[in-house]
Image: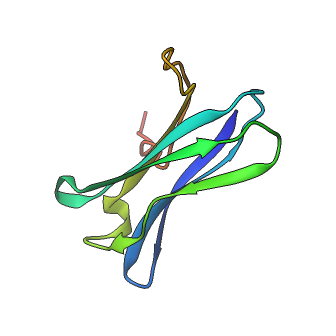
Amino acid sequence: MEAQTCVLVGEGRTWGRSYYRNTSGRPLEAVLTVMGPAGRTVQIRCGINAGDEPGLCETPREASTGTPDDYSAVAEFAVPDDEGALLLRSGSNSPAPRDG
């Protein structure tokens, strides 16, 4: 399983997108969450087919509030059965580098 998750901004709207490639050999489920200012969140579930073809999961586009830096996104990919085994978590933002 490979994934890259980002926050996109355009035309006064903000949304999350996760690009993925599911090489696990079985169908998975993804939950993509965008977190914004004032505790606002948007979440979507995506079914992920098994296979080596790239795909994407995307949240609805919502009106932007604040700046792009006020948003982050995280996608969690798991087995969609009673196991609930989390295979991968992919986030949009890295911590800022620290001195020393």
Q: Position of residue 70 (x, y in %)?
A: 31, 60
Q: Residue furthest right?
A: 52
Q: How is the image coloured?
A: rainbow
Q: Residue furthest front?
A: 81
Compared across the picture, whether 94 is left or right of 26 comes to: left
Is 47 located above or below residue 71 in the figure? above
Q: Residue furthest top?
A: 83
Compared across the picture, whether 75 is left or right of 71 comes to: right
Q: Residue shown at 52%/56% (left/top)? A: 6
Q: Residue shown at 55%/36% (left/top)? A: 29
| Quadrant of residue 68 within the rendered picture | bottom left
How many callouts does the rendering have?
A: 0
Placement of the C terminus among the 4 image quadrants: top left
Is 85 located above or below residue 51 in the figure? above
Q: Nearer the viewer, residue 82 or 71?
A: 82
Q: Position of residue 98 (x, y in %)?
A: 41, 39
Q: Nearer the viewer, residue 23 or 3?
A: 23
Compared across the picture, whether 90 is left or right of 44 comes to: right
Q: Residue shown at 55%/50% (left/top)? A: 5
| Quadrant of residue 95 within the rendered picture | top left
Q: Nearer the viewer, residue 38 or 42?
A: 42
Q: Position of residue 99 (x, y in %)?
A: 41, 39
Q: Residue furthest left?
A: 38
Placement of the N terminus among the 4 image quadrants: top right
Q: Position of residue 97 (x, y in %)?
A: 45, 43
Q: Residue shown at 41%/70% (left/top)? A: 61
Is 12 located above or below residue 2 in the figure? below
